[in-house]
Image (cartoon, rainbow, N blue to C red):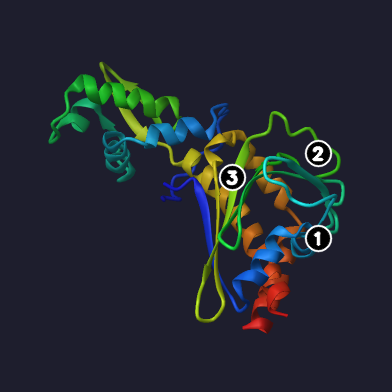
Amino acid sequence: MTYAIEKRIDLKAPVARVWRALTDYREFGEWFRVAIEGPFVVGQISRGHILYPGYEHIVWEAMIEKMEPERLFSFTWAQIRYLDKARYSCDYSNAPHTLVEFCLEKTTAGTLLTVIESGFENVPAEWRDDAQRNNEGGWTEQMKNIERYVAEKS
Amino acid sequence: MSRKNLRPSHPNRSSHAVLFAALGDKTRLALVARLSAGQPASISQLTRGTRLTRQAVTKHLRVLQRAAIVHSARFGREAIFSLDPEPMRQMQEYLDRVSRQWDQALARLKAFVEE
């Protein structure tokens, strides 16, 4: 049984381009949809807020762990129990944290990006029902958007 | 992972760490596999055909019970053990949710760097 999530995606862009999109805080913010206050610095906490419609009240916070140029970028962040405005809390001190690692590899077509998020064994079991509630509504619509997007791009 | 025989969610205060620790052992995984066939079994039945002692099986079953993936019921003098896939399913559901969010974010990254 896995307790990590691993994603691999082929990007038709040079490693240097992907590295910048991941580690320049403004570029990261563009595609991740978060407004980050300042540059990523190893060993420091980066803060901002989510720009995704409906989730603007959520504080984005990550501890930058590693930045090995054009190879590895990693940070830890909190798992958030409640995303809805009424129950959301921006105090992540007691929240379970997971590690996110972006690994870049040069390919003939561009870059192979592997994303691994690990540490889910720290997430309390009783959060499961919340996950379902958080997903109610918006999620189905979002999935349709992705399908449409992927269909157009491929 | 089996999605059959789902029971209503029971109060489960344990963290997933307990579940992972419980499943992080070959013998216990074998017991889970054995019980996942669907038939509840007694300690004698679970010991038969293995090199394990009754005591060892009992000990491993206790760990699985603490993780709430195995439940026992008493029939006369014998306890019968059955598998509850719900905690494993809950964990998978949480991971599926995070996984979908990554798919979405990475699709946006792809569009961003390839434009």
Q: In the image, residue B58 lies at what x, y percent?
A: 27, 22
Frontmost residue, B39 versus A132: A132
- Mark 2 element type: loop
Disc nearer the start of the sequence (2/3) = 2
Indicate the chain on which mark 2 is placed: A
Asked if A89 appears above or below A26 in the picture, the reply is above
* Residue labelled with disc 1: A26
**Mark 1 or mark 2: which is in front?**
1
Q: Is disc 2 on the same chain as disc 1?
A: yes
- Mark 1 element type: helix
Asked if A96 appears above or below A114 in the picture, the reply is above
Q: Residue at x 63, y 59 (%)?
A: B102
Indicate the chain on which mark 1 is placed: A
Disc 1, disc 2: CB below 8 Å? no
> Is residue B57 shown to the viewer in this render?
yes
Q: CA distance from mark 3 to mark 1?
A: 21 Å
* Residue labelled with disc 2: A88
Disc 3, disc 1: CB below 8 Å? no
Q: Amino acid type of disc 3?
A: Leu
Q: Residue at x 66, y 74 (%)?
A: A147
Q: In the image, residue B91 lies at what x, y percent?
A: 53, 43
- Mark 3 element type: strand
Disc nearer the start of the sequence (3/1) = 1
Q: Residue at x 68, y 40 (%)?
A: A43
Q: Quadrant of the C terminus of chain A?
A: bottom right
* Residue labelled with disc 3: A99
